[in-house]
Amino acid sequence: MICPYCGKENSDNVRLCAYCGGFLLEGDDQSPSDDLSSEVTSPPSISPSEPTIDVDPPAVHPDSSHVEPATEFESPVTPYEVYPTQGFQPPAKGSKSGCGKWIWWFVGCVVLICLLMGCVAALWGLYSYTSASGFLNPTTSRPDTVQDSANLLFSDDFSDPSSGWDRVNETDYLSNYVENAYRIQVNKEMMDIWANPDDLSFVDVSIEVDATKNGGPDDNDFGLICRYQDLDHFYYGIISSDGYYGIIKSTADGSETLGRDSLEYSDLINQAFTTNHIRFDCIGDVLTLYVDGNQLDQQTDSEYISGNVGLTAGTYKTPATDILFDNFKVYQP
């Protein structure tokens, strides 16, 4: 069989040309020219005068050519030419008339003047009220103590280490002057230590002192002594850094809390590392304990009539009580 593409002779039982790979047709079903036009996939040659593809005419007349502004996309756009699509408006204040602006300035000035006048009036009223109140109810200075300086029997600010107080430094305790104060430190549990100035003796007294916790536990006690006769006979009023108070009587058989079984609590006492102004009155058979001008306790006992004064501090289950005393004063009531 002759290949219609290359003209080579091929066997009768093959369908593809062994030389060019073309498709061989049997018999005379089609002419070589027909086979070529039907099998070739490439487009036939097109005559220049006969276009095979119809092209729609452009929407714009050829004479009115549309030129794309390429330079518009090549050059950067200035910020004043582009705004966000939402949420932004150019400032409108400059477009308002000058009259509206001056009206707001005028309103603001009026409001400011009214406020200033109100403040001046309030200050003047306060001054006038204070002056009238002072005239109708003149203030009188109230001394921190119950007695004035004319009734002062003894005082010590502990600035002079030779003023006569005990100076002891033992393993379990110490009592000594330190930095213009008097310090009592107790390093053993369940122990009370006290100190006295010289060998003084008073009958009725009002004693005052400033006491500050310097260290150790809040579970402590500290205060003032009156009518001290010896190691076993005296009264003392105490408070603690955790808010307890009481009036104690010391005897040869031990100490007893007058009027109650144990110390009681009061929120009038400044707790922890703070200062309390303690006052202890021993007048006749009445014993009264104060803190910062507030009465905490009052008891009666007539066994001890006179004696020395002093300071005391002690521990309970936790040692290392450390108290600083200052401005010790004794008045005749």
Image: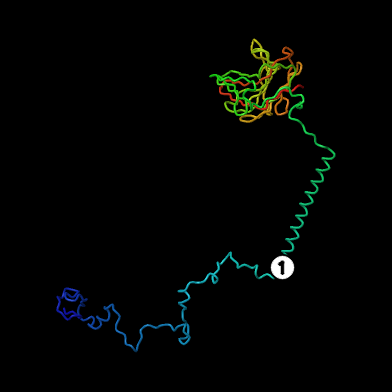
Please, is residue 104 above or below residue 290 in the view?
below
The one nearer the camera, 295 or 95, is: 295
Q: How many marks?
A: 1
Residue most extreme to the bottom: 49
Which quarter shows the N terminus?
A: bottom left
Q: Which residue is rendered at x = 80% and y = 36% of the image?
A: 139
Quadrant location, the C terminus: top right
Q: In the displayed image of the protein, which residue is found farthest to the right?
A: 136
How are the colours assigned in the image? rainbow
- Residue 105 lies, in percent from the top left, at 72, 64
Categorize mark 1 by other alpha carbons within 10 Å: few (<14), some (14-19), many (20+): few
The residue where tag 1 is placed is 100
User: 150 or 275: nearer the eye?
Assistant: 150
- Decide if residue 78 is on the left or right side of residue 250: left
The quarter of the picture where residue 33 lies is bottom left
Residue 95: image quadrant is: bottom right
Amino acid found under the numbered disc labelled 1: Gly
Residue displayed at 47% across by 78% down: 69
Residue 170 position, x and y percent, is 55, 19
Tell me where residue 213 appears, x and y as whole percent: 61, 28
Rendered position, 11 above or below 49: above
- Of the pair 265 and 74, the residue shown nearer to us: 265
In this view, the residue in front, 146 or 163, is: 163
Along the horizontal axis of the image, is 247 left or right of 183?
Answer: right
- Residue 232 at x, y percent in the picture: 65, 12
Please say if 22 is above or below 175: below
Q: Outermost residue toward the top?
A: 252
The kind of secondary structure element at disc 1 is helix
The answer to whether 81 is drawn above or below residue 245 in the figure is below
